[in-house]
Image (spheres, rainbow, N blue to C red):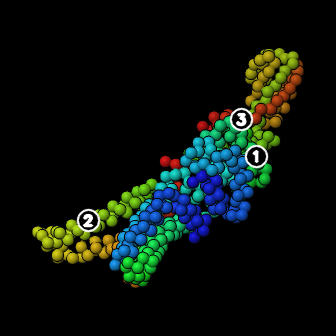
Amino acid sequence: MTGWQFLRYMARLSGISARDVRTRADAMLDRLGLTAAADRPLGEYSRGMLQRIALCQALIHEPDFLFLDEPASGLDPNGVLLVRDLIAEQKARGATVLLNSHQLAEVEKVCDRVLFLHRGVVAQAETLRAADRRVVAIRLLLGTYDPANVRRITGSDAEDGVVKVSTASDADIAAVVGALVRSGASVVEVRPQTADLEAIFRGVA
Amino acid sequence: MNAVVIGETMRRHLTRGGYIVYLILVALTGIFASTFNKPAAMWPSLVALLAIITGSSLIGPEFSSATLQLIVSKPIHRWTYLLSRVAGVFASVALAAIIGMSAEIGMRWLGGRAPLVWQPSVSTALNALVVAFLAVSLLALLGSVTRSYFNVAIYIGAQAALSAAEAILGVLRMRGPVGEVLQAHPWIERSIIATNDALFPSASAELGRALVLRVLVMATIALTLACLAFERREVPYGAD
């Protein structure tokens, strides 16, 4: 069975009419970079090409809900970027995408929400939308300061005027900054730091 | 039934060199059979053998490839998929029976070397199809509970075992203490013969109403069990 025949079969099973199959399949093959290999048997496809044709058949009927299990597995860097773009396109057209992956960096780039599963149970739920992300620390850039006061207030030493403070709430941030200013330090910059997935994962594991 | 699955199943057969060669062989056998006085010789057995060959890849091997996991993600009931595959395979076998029968009847009509007796030919062709349908149904059942080509191994193994048991019991019935037991309990031998006839009827006989009924009952049971097994079976992730 060639790639084209496989895609046509899957498209027809997905409910696409015989009239529309050619147009949609050609468009998907072109989008996934498989046009040149469309007439080759699937047995001759590399792992990455099989992954691409599997994505073709999953996307060809524009489903409302997509469950993608390690979609970037076996793909070269171009393929990984393509998958990322495809997921963004599906989100943009209003589809819900459930991405199952062990690649935390990839998940962080494309997902809005993430669930960590541990032994089949949801161990941690996080939102990755920038506006909603949880602040876990602040990074303070100080102009003039007294190292002893900084150590007393933040519990950390400043290095080249930079001190990192773990914090849980906006009130904590205000309290720390206020105390530093009252001690005579000049605070040049306050940069909130959100938890990255790797840090969250370390907390879950 | 799903026309897409039936069509794809037939397309796979019709585009396979081995299948085309087999059809040519059936046609040649039909032509050769037209020289015999006895109608419908040999080619019905080829049709029954084709049912086993094509039925062997009906569903079992799909468990070993990564295709099935994609198919079951499509909006099609599993039982619809299975029955459509059975229909597609059966249609491919029916094509062989039609070719064998047409070749024989056509050559009898054209050649005139043997009497043109189309009724027995048609009757035997229908019998071969009924037998083929049962074989495909049984292979669908075995395929839905096994992997790869184990289904055909079990099918042929069971057929050989029942035939061997029949022959061995026939010999043992005449001798010694085992023979006395068999003669005292004739149901043992009768049940083995009945099971063999029910599961593996002859492909070369003329069509009979009793055979059709028996086969339809057996095939219905086999397909029902196959659908139930296939519905419940976990489809493995990825290829072997």
- Check disc 2 and report the residue beneath it: B164
Which chain is home to disc 2?
A: B
Mark 1 vs mark 2: tell me if same chain.
no
Three-letter code for the amino acid on which mark 2 is drawn = Ala
Q: Residue, x 63% and y 34% (percent of image)? A: A202
Local crowd size for mark 3, using a 10 Å CA cut-off: few (<14), some (14–19), many (≥20): some
- Check disc 3 and report the residue beneath it: A196
- Check disc 1 and report the residue beneath it: A88
Q: Is residue A172 left or right of residue B102?
A: right
Three-letter code for the amino acid on which mark 3 is drawn = Asp
Q: Residue, x 20% and y 75% (percent of image)? A: B185
Which image quadrant: the N terminus of chain B?
Answer: bottom right
Q: CA distance from mark 1 to mark 3?
A: 20 Å
Residue B163 against residue A82 in the figure, above or below? below
Q: Residue, x 87% and y 23% (percent of image)? A: A187
Residue A64 against residue A129 in the figure, above or below? below
Looking at this view, name the residue that lies furthest to the left: B176
Q: Secondary structure at mark 1?
A: helix
Q: Is residue B213 left or right of residue B162?
A: right
Looking at the picture, how far across and down is residue A112, in whole percent? 74, 45
Q: Residue, x 78% and y 22% (percent of image)? A: A163
